[in-house]
């Protein structure tokens, strides 16, 4: 065989080298496009299950259709092991199938139509609140395990959590030049949060960001909010354990004090340390809350009390699809051998 480096001298071969290079280049480009498009659609099995103990976990759909890298569980979620795939041809062999509610709730035909292999778990995954979860009855007598932000789920996938710091370290409060911020994309005038905002804004300056308001890009979110002393972490609906990225990421990650409107204070206290948030229910009226915030604004020592917890603890305010699915692996390894959920809508309220 002729080596590419040995340039042929015969005139007949004169053009062969550039043409060959072009062909090689085109093949490489084509392979690259193929790889790219398979990442963007269903990701094929990158690696087969490594050991017998590996559970085969099928993502029936990508959540909201968005693919992400599979089989790369971050620490500390990398033990025990699972083999994840989003290729539905694995269905007959899968130990578990995870259904992201939003992607399968329009019609029962979006669920597998082939009988379930023996012993296979069907996992119901949902991060939306019950108020925004249509057609739960489609899932009656089908699902074996729940995977939600609710702490009594079989697989608990909260929007954020508190971790102990490796070593205690005083927290530096970001420099503050503004008072109260709110970000809202879905402006529903009848919602509790908009009604409360309307009362509050008469007594204290609130800067509102989001659709129909001041613009704020995802990249700037943390740096902009960190300049505020307070952030309104108002949930779109009120349900037990339903605290979203508004609390964990927008407020806590940016080093501001969350003003929370959601489930009762005792519910927040299960997940957050004392003096890490201000609950609207602690005040007889929005005016009283506003007065308290203005008081804190003038009293730095009192305001700083809301950051004391941060010398020992830190918020983990941003989670990823990878992490959520990796948690499912741990849950599946510890799952009871038989479990079934007769009615999701009775449980998920
Ligand atoms: C899905 O897996 C099957 C069987 O392993 C394979 O033949 C097929 O090419 C895969 N599909 C995709 C889109 O990767
Ligand atoms: C934090 O600051 C306080 C007082 O400002 C000080 O007494 C304490 O030793 C500091 N703790 C750490 C871990 O640096
Ligand atoms: C899962 O639930 C279905 C429907 O109730 C049931 O037939 C099946 O045996 C259950 N599987 C496991 C592993 O619990």
Image: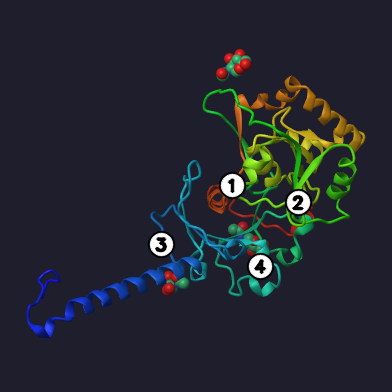
Q: Which residue is mark 1?
A: 319
Residue designated by label 2: 184
Q: Quadrant of ligand 2?
A: top right
C-alpha span from label 2 to label 1 = 20 Å
Earlier residue among tags 1 and 3: 3
Name the residue: 76% across, 53% down. 213
- Left or right, 139 with respect to 187, comes to left
Give residue 166's position: percent from left, percent from top.
Answer: 52, 27
The answer to whether the residues at label 2 and label 4 have Cβ atoms under 8 Å apart is no
What whole-number distance in Å separates the C-alpha atoms at marks 3 and 2?
Answer: 40 Å
The reply to whether the C-beta atoms of the residues labelled 1 and 4 are less than 8 Å apart is: no
Q: Secondary structure at mark 2?
A: loop
Question: Disc 3 or 2, which lies upstream in sequence?
Answer: 3
Circles 2, 1 touching at the beta carbon (< 8 Å): no
Q: Position of residue 250 (x, y in %)?
A: 67, 43
Reading the image, the residue beneath label 4 is 104
Q: How many labels, in total?
A: 4
């Amino acid at each position: 065989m002729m080596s590419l480096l040995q340039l042929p001298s015969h005139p007949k071969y004169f053009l062969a080298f550039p043409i060959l290079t072009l062909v090689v280049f085109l093949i490489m480009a084509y392979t690259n496009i193929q790889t790219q498009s398979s990442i963007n659609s269903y990701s094929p099995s990158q690696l087969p299950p490594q050991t017998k103990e590996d559970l085969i976990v099928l993502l029936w759909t990508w959540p909201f259709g968005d693919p992400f890298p599979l089989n790369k569980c971050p620490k500390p979620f990398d033990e025990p092991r699972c083999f994840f795939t989003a290729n539905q041809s694995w269905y007959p062999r899968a130990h578990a199938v995870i259904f992201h509610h939003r992607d399968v709730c329009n019609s029962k035909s979006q669920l597998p139509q082939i009988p379930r292999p023996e012993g296979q778990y069907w996992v119901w995954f949902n991060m939306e609140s019950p108020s925004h979860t249509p057609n739960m009855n489609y899932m009656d007598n089908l699902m074996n395990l729940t995977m939600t932000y609710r702490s009594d789920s079989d697989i608990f996938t909260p929007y954020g959590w508190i971790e102990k710091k490796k070593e205690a370290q005083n927290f530096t409060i970001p420099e503050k030049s503004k008072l109260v911020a709110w970000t809202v994309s879905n402006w529903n005038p009848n919602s509790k949060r908009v009604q409360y905002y309307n009362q509050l804004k008469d007594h204290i300056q609130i800067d509102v960001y989001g659709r129909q308001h001041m613009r704020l890009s995802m990249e700037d979110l943390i740096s902009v909010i960190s300049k505020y002393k307070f952030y309104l972490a108002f949930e779109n609906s009120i349900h037990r354990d339903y605290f979203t990225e508004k609390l964990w990421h927008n407020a806590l990650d940016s080093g501001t004090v969350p003003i929370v409107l959601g489930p009762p204070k005792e519910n927040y206290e299960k997940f957050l340390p004392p003096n890490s948030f201000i609950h609207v229910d602690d005040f007889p009226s929005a005016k009283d809350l506003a007065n308290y915030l203005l008081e804190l604004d003038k009293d730095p020592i009192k305001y700083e009390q809301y950051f004391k917890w941060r010398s020992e603890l830190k918020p983990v305010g941003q989670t990823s699809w990878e992490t959520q699915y990796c948690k499912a692996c741990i849950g599946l390894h510890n799952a009871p051998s038989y479990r079934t959920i007769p009615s999701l809508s009775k449980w998920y309220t």
